[in-house]
Amino acid sequence: MSPGITALTQELDNNMLIAFIGGGNMATALISGLSKKVEQGLTIRVAEPSEEARARLQSSFDVFVSSSAASVAQGADVIVLAVKPQVLPAVLSELSGTIEPGQLVLSIAAGATIAAISQQLGPRQVIIRSMPNTPALVGEGISVLCAGEHCRPHHRDQAERILHAAGEVLWVDDETLMDAVTAVSGSGPAYFFLLTEALAEAGVRLGLKEDVAHKLAECTCIGAGAMLKQSTSGQSTTVGAAELRQRVTSPGGTTQAALNAFADGKFKELVYAAAAAAERRGNELSLAAAARGPGK
Ligand SMILES: NC(=O)c1ccc[n+]([C@@H]2O[C@H](COP(=O)([O-])OP(=O)(O)OC[C@H]3O[C@@H](n4cnc5c(N)ncnc54)[C@H](OP(=O)(O)O)[C@@H]3O)[C@@H](O)[C@H]2O)c1
Protein backbone atom coordinates (compact mmCIF):
# COMPACT_ATOMS: atom_id res chain seq x y z
CA MET A 1 0.00 0.00 0.00
CA SER A 2 1.40 3.42 -0.92
CA PRO A 3 1.94 6.01 1.87
CA GLY A 4 -0.88 8.11 0.36
CA ILE A 5 -3.37 5.26 0.59
CA THR A 6 -2.31 4.49 4.19
CA ALA A 7 -2.86 8.13 5.18
CA LEU A 8 -6.28 8.17 3.48
CA THR A 9 -7.30 4.93 5.23
CA GLN A 10 -6.28 6.34 8.62
CA GLU A 11 -8.20 9.53 7.92
CA LEU A 12 -11.32 7.54 7.03
CA ASP A 13 -10.89 5.38 10.15
CA ASN A 14 -10.68 8.52 12.28
CA ASN A 15 -14.01 9.80 11.05
CA MET A 16 -16.72 9.09 13.56
CA LEU A 17 -20.26 10.33 13.83
CA ILE A 18 -21.41 10.16 17.44
CA ALA A 19 -25.05 10.53 18.43
CA PHE A 20 -25.63 11.31 22.09
CA ILE A 21 -29.13 10.46 23.26
CA GLY A 22 -29.54 12.74 26.27
CA GLY A 23 -27.57 15.95 26.68
CA GLY A 24 -27.29 16.07 30.49
CA ASN A 25 -24.32 16.03 32.86
CA MET A 26 -22.55 12.94 31.63
CA ALA A 27 -23.07 13.63 27.91
CA THR A 28 -21.83 17.20 28.43
CA ALA A 29 -18.73 15.91 30.24
CA LEU A 30 -17.94 13.56 27.35
CA ILE A 31 -18.67 16.16 24.67
CA SER A 32 -16.53 18.70 26.52
CA GLY A 33 -13.64 16.21 26.76
CA LEU A 34 -13.96 15.27 23.09
CA SER A 35 -14.07 18.96 22.10
CA LYS A 36 -10.96 19.79 24.15
CA LYS A 37 -9.01 17.02 22.42
CA VAL A 38 -9.71 18.81 19.10
CA GLU A 39 -9.82 15.45 17.38
CA GLN A 40 -10.07 15.46 13.62
CA GLY A 41 -13.00 13.73 11.97
CA LEU A 42 -15.48 13.82 14.85
CA THR A 43 -19.05 14.85 14.22
CA ILE A 44 -21.33 15.09 17.24
CA ARG A 45 -25.10 15.14 17.33
CA VAL A 46 -27.19 15.37 20.49
CA ALA A 47 -30.84 14.49 21.07
CA GLU A 48 -32.20 16.37 24.06
CA PRO A 49 -35.83 17.25 24.88
CA SER A 50 -35.06 20.44 26.81
CA GLU A 51 -34.82 23.49 24.53
CA GLU A 52 -32.71 25.29 27.12
CA ALA A 53 -30.22 22.39 27.29
CA ARG A 54 -30.06 22.23 23.48
CA ALA A 55 -29.26 25.94 23.31
CA ARG A 56 -26.58 25.57 26.00
CA LEU A 57 -24.95 22.66 24.17
CA GLN A 58 -25.02 24.44 20.83
CA SER A 59 -23.51 27.64 22.23
CA SER A 60 -20.73 25.74 24.04
CA PHE A 61 -19.71 23.11 21.49
CA ASP A 62 -19.59 22.40 17.78
CA VAL A 63 -22.58 20.03 17.85
CA PHE A 64 -25.82 19.47 15.96
CA VAL A 65 -28.82 19.32 18.31
CA SER A 66 -32.34 17.98 17.92
CA SER A 67 -35.26 16.90 20.07
CA SER A 68 -35.56 13.62 18.16
CA ALA A 69 -33.47 10.62 19.24
CA ALA A 70 -34.33 8.69 16.06
CA SER A 71 -33.15 11.46 13.76
CA VAL A 72 -29.78 12.01 15.48
CA ALA A 73 -29.15 8.27 15.64
CA GLN A 74 -29.75 7.75 11.93
CA GLY A 75 -26.45 6.96 10.18
CA ALA A 76 -24.33 7.49 13.33
CA ASP A 77 -21.33 5.22 13.91
CA VAL A 78 -21.92 5.26 17.66
CA ILE A 79 -25.12 5.94 19.56
CA VAL A 80 -24.36 6.89 23.16
CA LEU A 81 -27.28 6.20 25.50
CA ALA A 82 -26.84 8.96 28.08
CA VAL A 83 -30.33 9.17 29.56
CA LYS A 84 -31.44 8.19 33.06
CA PRO A 85 -32.10 4.44 33.39
CA GLN A 86 -35.83 4.99 33.94
CA VAL A 87 -36.10 6.83 30.59
CA LEU A 88 -34.08 4.22 28.71
CA PRO A 89 -36.93 1.82 27.76
CA ALA A 90 -38.84 4.67 26.07
CA VAL A 91 -35.70 5.82 24.24
CA LEU A 92 -34.94 2.28 23.08
CA SER A 93 -38.45 1.80 21.78
CA GLU A 94 -38.04 5.08 19.82
CA LEU A 95 -34.74 3.83 18.39
CA SER A 96 -35.76 0.25 17.61
CA GLY A 97 -36.46 -0.18 13.95
CA THR A 98 -34.53 3.03 13.16
CA ILE A 99 -30.97 1.94 13.85
CA GLU A 100 -28.96 -0.75 12.07
CA PRO A 101 -27.55 -3.77 13.95
CA GLY A 102 -23.99 -2.75 12.95
CA GLN A 103 -24.22 0.68 14.59
CA LEU A 104 -22.49 0.63 17.96
CA VAL A 105 -24.82 1.31 20.87
CA LEU A 106 -22.72 2.52 23.82
CA SER A 107 -24.79 2.65 26.99
CA ILE A 108 -23.68 4.60 30.04
CA ALA A 109 -27.01 4.06 31.84
CA ALA A 110 -26.37 2.61 35.29
CA GLY A 111 -27.75 -0.89 35.74
CA ALA A 112 -29.05 -1.39 32.19
CA THR A 113 -27.78 -4.80 31.08
CA ILE A 114 -26.68 -5.72 27.57
CA ALA A 115 -29.45 -8.35 27.51
CA ALA A 116 -32.10 -5.77 28.44
CA ILE A 117 -30.91 -3.39 25.71
CA SER A 118 -30.69 -6.10 23.07
CA GLN A 119 -34.14 -7.31 24.03
CA GLN A 120 -35.46 -4.00 22.71
CA LEU A 121 -33.00 -3.38 19.86
CA GLY A 122 -32.71 -6.95 18.59
CA PRO A 123 -30.29 -9.81 19.25
CA ARG A 124 -27.83 -8.78 16.50
CA GLN A 125 -27.27 -5.22 17.76
CA VAL A 126 -23.67 -4.26 18.59
CA ILE A 127 -23.74 -3.10 22.23
CA ILE A 128 -21.15 -1.97 24.75
CA ARG A 129 -22.19 -1.27 28.32
CA SER A 130 -20.10 1.10 30.37
CA MET A 131 -20.00 2.50 33.87
CA PRO A 132 -18.38 5.94 34.11
CA ASN A 133 -18.15 7.83 37.38
CA THR A 134 -18.80 11.40 38.49
CA PRO A 135 -15.18 12.67 38.30
CA ALA A 136 -15.72 12.37 34.54
CA LEU A 137 -17.34 15.79 34.97
CA VAL A 138 -13.86 17.22 35.60
CA GLY A 139 -11.99 14.92 33.19
CA GLU A 140 -10.74 12.67 36.03
CA GLY A 141 -13.18 9.80 35.66
CA ILE A 142 -12.69 6.12 35.14
CA SER A 143 -15.05 4.12 32.95
CA VAL A 144 -15.33 0.37 32.92
CA LEU A 145 -16.61 -1.19 29.71
CA CYS A 146 -18.08 -4.56 28.85
CA ALA A 147 -18.57 -5.62 25.24
CA GLY A 148 -21.60 -7.50 23.92
CA GLU A 149 -21.05 -10.58 21.77
CA HIS A 150 -21.18 -8.84 18.36
CA CYS A 151 -18.49 -6.28 19.15
CA ARG A 152 -15.48 -6.18 16.87
CA PRO A 153 -12.13 -4.53 17.65
CA HIS A 154 -13.05 -1.29 15.88
CA HIS A 155 -16.18 -0.97 18.05
CA ARG A 156 -14.01 -1.29 21.16
CA ASP A 157 -11.69 1.39 19.76
CA GLN A 158 -14.64 3.71 19.10
CA ALA A 159 -16.00 3.26 22.65
CA GLU A 160 -12.55 3.83 24.19
CA ARG A 161 -12.03 6.96 22.10
CA ILE A 162 -15.28 8.43 23.45
CA LEU A 163 -14.84 7.48 27.11
CA HIS A 164 -11.15 8.41 27.18
CA ALA A 165 -12.43 11.96 26.80
CA ALA A 166 -13.53 11.81 30.45
CA GLY A 167 -10.61 9.91 31.96
CA GLU A 168 -9.30 6.39 32.08
CA VAL A 169 -10.85 3.28 30.57
CA LEU A 170 -10.78 -0.37 31.67
CA TRP A 171 -12.55 -3.46 30.32
CA VAL A 172 -14.18 -6.41 32.07
CA ASP A 173 -15.17 -9.59 30.23
CA ASP A 174 -17.79 -10.71 32.71
CA GLU A 175 -20.80 -8.38 32.77
CA THR A 176 -21.89 -9.61 36.21
CA LEU A 177 -18.84 -7.76 37.58
CA MET A 178 -20.41 -4.43 36.60
CA ASP A 179 -22.21 -4.32 39.97
CA ALA A 180 -18.84 -4.69 41.74
CA VAL A 181 -17.46 -1.93 39.50
CA THR A 182 -20.41 0.26 40.48
CA ALA A 183 -19.67 -0.48 44.14
CA VAL A 184 -16.04 0.63 43.81
CA SER A 185 -15.71 3.39 41.19
CA GLY A 186 -19.36 4.29 40.46
CA SER A 187 -20.41 4.96 44.05
CA GLY A 188 -16.80 5.41 45.25
CA PRO A 189 -16.50 9.19 44.95
CA ALA A 190 -19.21 9.53 47.64
CA TYR A 191 -17.13 7.39 50.03
CA PHE A 192 -14.20 9.81 49.73
CA PHE A 193 -16.54 12.78 50.21
CA LEU A 194 -17.91 11.08 53.35
CA LEU A 195 -14.40 10.53 54.74
CA THR A 196 -13.55 14.18 54.05
CA GLU A 197 -16.76 15.27 55.77
CA ALA A 198 -16.07 12.99 58.76
CA LEU A 199 -12.49 14.26 59.08
CA ALA A 200 -13.71 17.87 59.05
CA GLU A 201 -16.25 17.03 61.79
CA ALA A 202 -13.49 15.35 63.81
CA GLY A 203 -11.39 18.52 63.49
CA VAL A 204 -14.29 20.60 64.85
CA ARG A 205 -14.70 18.19 67.80
CA LEU A 206 -10.98 18.59 68.46
CA GLY A 207 -11.42 22.36 68.75
CA LEU A 208 -10.80 23.73 65.24
CA LYS A 209 -13.10 26.36 63.75
CA GLU A 210 -15.53 24.84 61.26
CA ASP A 211 -14.15 26.65 58.19
CA VAL A 212 -10.59 25.76 59.16
CA ALA A 213 -11.48 22.11 59.73
CA HIS A 214 -13.26 21.85 56.36
CA LYS A 215 -10.38 23.54 54.53
CA LEU A 216 -7.86 21.19 56.14
CA ALA A 217 -9.88 18.06 55.37
CA GLU A 218 -10.64 19.10 51.78
CA CYS A 219 -7.08 20.12 50.93
CA THR A 220 -5.78 16.94 52.51
CA CYS A 221 -8.12 14.82 50.37
CA ILE A 222 -7.08 16.70 47.21
CA GLY A 223 -3.39 16.49 48.13
CA ALA A 224 -3.53 12.77 48.91
CA GLY A 225 -5.36 12.20 45.59
CA ALA A 226 -2.73 14.19 43.72
CA MET A 227 0.09 12.16 45.35
CA LEU A 228 -1.66 8.93 44.43
CA LYS A 229 -2.20 10.14 40.88
CA GLN A 230 1.43 11.14 40.46
CA SER A 231 2.74 7.92 41.94
CA THR A 232 0.48 5.60 39.94
CA SER A 233 0.99 7.34 36.60
CA GLY A 234 4.80 6.88 36.69
CA GLN A 235 6.24 4.73 33.90
CA SER A 236 8.33 2.31 35.97
CA THR A 237 8.07 3.22 39.64
CA THR A 238 4.40 2.68 40.31
CA VAL A 239 3.59 3.05 44.00
CA GLY A 240 0.11 2.23 45.24
CA ALA A 241 -2.00 3.54 48.10
CA ALA A 242 -0.67 1.01 50.64
CA GLU A 243 2.95 2.00 49.98
CA LEU A 244 2.11 5.72 50.19
CA ARG A 245 0.34 5.12 53.49
CA GLN A 246 3.33 3.26 54.88
CA ARG A 247 5.68 6.05 53.77
CA VAL A 248 3.75 8.66 55.77
CA THR A 249 3.41 6.45 58.87
CA SER A 250 6.34 6.59 61.28
CA PRO A 251 6.32 3.76 63.83
CA GLY A 252 4.96 5.02 67.13
CA GLY A 253 3.95 8.36 65.63
CA THR A 254 0.67 10.26 65.32
CA THR A 255 -0.42 8.69 62.03
CA GLN A 256 0.27 5.21 63.45
CA ALA A 257 -1.94 6.04 66.45
CA ALA A 258 -4.78 7.07 64.12
CA LEU A 259 -4.36 3.99 61.90
CA ASN A 260 -4.45 1.73 64.98
CA ALA A 261 -7.78 3.31 65.92
CA PHE A 262 -9.06 2.68 62.36
CA ALA A 263 -7.97 -0.97 62.62
CA ASP A 264 -9.59 -1.36 66.07
CA GLY A 265 -12.82 -0.07 64.52
CA LYS A 266 -12.51 -2.66 61.71
CA PHE A 267 -12.32 0.07 59.07
CA LYS A 268 -11.52 -2.28 56.17
CA GLU A 269 -14.42 -4.58 57.11
CA LEU A 270 -16.72 -1.55 57.21
CA VAL A 271 -15.57 -0.42 53.74
CA TYR A 272 -16.15 -3.96 52.45
CA ALA A 273 -19.66 -4.01 53.97
CA ALA A 274 -20.43 -0.65 52.32
CA ALA A 275 -19.18 -1.77 48.90
CA ALA A 276 -21.01 -5.09 49.19
CA ALA A 277 -24.24 -3.20 50.01
CA ALA A 278 -23.75 -1.05 46.88
CA GLU A 279 -23.12 -4.15 44.77
CA ARG A 280 -26.28 -5.85 46.11
CA ARG A 281 -28.34 -2.73 45.45
CA GLY A 282 -26.98 -2.45 41.91
CA ASN A 283 -27.98 -6.03 41.27
CA GLU A 284 -31.48 -5.46 42.74
CA LEU A 285 -31.99 -2.36 40.56
CA SER A 286 -30.92 -4.23 37.39
CA LEU A 287 -33.28 -7.10 38.23
CA ALA A 288 -36.14 -4.71 38.97
CA ALA A 289 -35.57 -2.91 35.64
CA ALA A 290 -35.48 -6.25 33.79
CA ALA A 291 -38.69 -7.37 35.56
CA ARG A 292 -40.46 -4.16 34.51
CA GLY A 293 -39.60 -5.05 30.92
CA PRO A 294 -39.43 -2.89 27.79
CA GLY A 295 -41.32 0.37 27.75
CA LYS A 296 -42.81 0.03 31.28
N1 LIG B 1 -23.70 11.44 36.58
C1 LIG B 1 -22.90 10.44 36.89
O1 LIG B 1 -21.97 10.56 37.66
C2 LIG B 1 -23.09 9.08 36.27
C3 LIG B 1 -22.19 8.06 36.58
C4 LIG B 1 -22.36 6.82 35.96
C5 LIG B 1 -23.40 6.61 35.10
N2 LIG B 1 -24.28 7.63 34.85
C6 LIG B 1 -25.38 7.35 33.96
O2 LIG B 1 -25.36 8.30 32.92
C7 LIG B 1 -26.70 8.52 32.47
C8 LIG B 1 -26.93 10.01 32.36
O3 LIG B 1 -26.75 10.58 33.65
P1 LIG B 1 -26.68 12.15 33.84
O4 LIG B 1 -26.16 12.40 35.21
O5 LIG B 1 -25.99 12.76 32.66
O6 LIG B 1 -28.24 12.48 33.79
P2 LIG B 1 -28.95 13.86 33.35
O7 LIG B 1 -28.07 15.01 33.64
O8 LIG B 1 -30.33 13.81 33.91
O9 LIG B 1 -29.01 13.71 31.75
C9 LIG B 1 -29.97 12.95 31.08
C10 LIG B 1 -30.53 13.83 29.97
O10 LIG B 1 -31.36 13.03 29.13
C11 LIG B 1 -32.44 13.84 28.73
N3 LIG B 1 -33.58 13.05 28.23
C12 LIG B 1 -34.67 12.64 28.90
N4 LIG B 1 -35.49 11.96 28.06
C13 LIG B 1 -34.90 11.92 26.85
C14 LIG B 1 -35.25 11.40 25.58
N5 LIG B 1 -36.38 10.70 25.40
N6 LIG B 1 -34.41 11.57 24.53
C15 LIG B 1 -33.25 12.25 24.72
N7 LIG B 1 -32.86 12.78 25.88
C16 LIG B 1 -33.67 12.63 26.95
C17 LIG B 1 -32.77 14.62 29.98
O11 LIG B 1 -33.54 15.76 29.64
P3 LIG B 1 -34.57 16.36 30.76
O12 LIG B 1 -33.71 16.76 31.93
O13 LIG B 1 -35.19 17.49 30.05
O14 LIG B 1 -35.49 15.24 31.10
C18 LIG B 1 -31.38 14.99 30.49
O15 LIG B 1 -30.91 16.18 29.92
C19 LIG B 1 -27.63 7.85 33.51
O16 LIG B 1 -28.18 6.67 32.96
C20 LIG B 1 -26.72 7.51 34.66
O17 LIG B 1 -27.11 6.28 35.24
C21 LIG B 1 -24.14 8.86 35.41
Image (cartoon, rainbow, N blue to C red):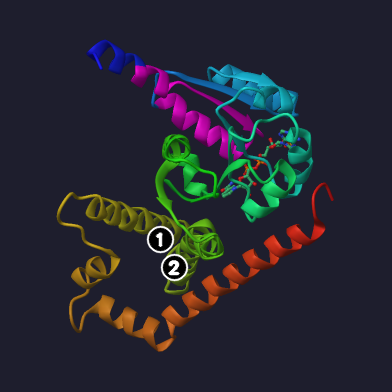
Residue in front for this viewpoint, 206 or 1: 1
* Residue 290 at x, y percent in the picture: 74, 59
Q: Which mark is residue 104?
A: none
Residue kind at label 1, given as amino acid type: Ala
User: Which residue is pictured at 36% across the width and 18% down the height?
Assistant: 9
User: Which residue is pictured at 33% across the width and 85% down the height?
Assistant: 260
215 versus 19 height, above or below: below
Ligand 1 sits in quadrant: top right
State the SS at label 2: helix
In the figure, is residue 245 to the left or right of 164? Answer: left
Tell me which corner region of the image, top left, top right, bottom left or bottom right, holds residue 156: top left
Q: Which residues are magenta?
A: 9-36
169 versus 198 height, above or below: above
Crowd band around label 2 with a 10 angstrom C-alpha radius: few (<14), some (14–19), many (20+)? some
Confirm or deny contact between disc 2 and disc 1 (CB under 8 A). Answer: yes
Pick out the residue farthest to the right.
296
Q: Is residue 240 magenta?
A: no
Disc 2 target residue: 199
Residue kind at label 2, given as amino acid type: Leu
Mark 2 or 1, nearer chain start:
2
Q: Is residue 29 magenta?
A: yes
Crowd band around label 1 with a 10 angstrom C-alpha radius: few (<14), some (14–19), many (20+)? many
In the figure, is residue 284 to the left or right of 252? Answer: right
Disc 1 target residue: 217
Residue in front for this viewpoint, 47 or 232: 47
* Residues at marks 2 and 1, CA–CA distance in whole angstroms: 6 Å
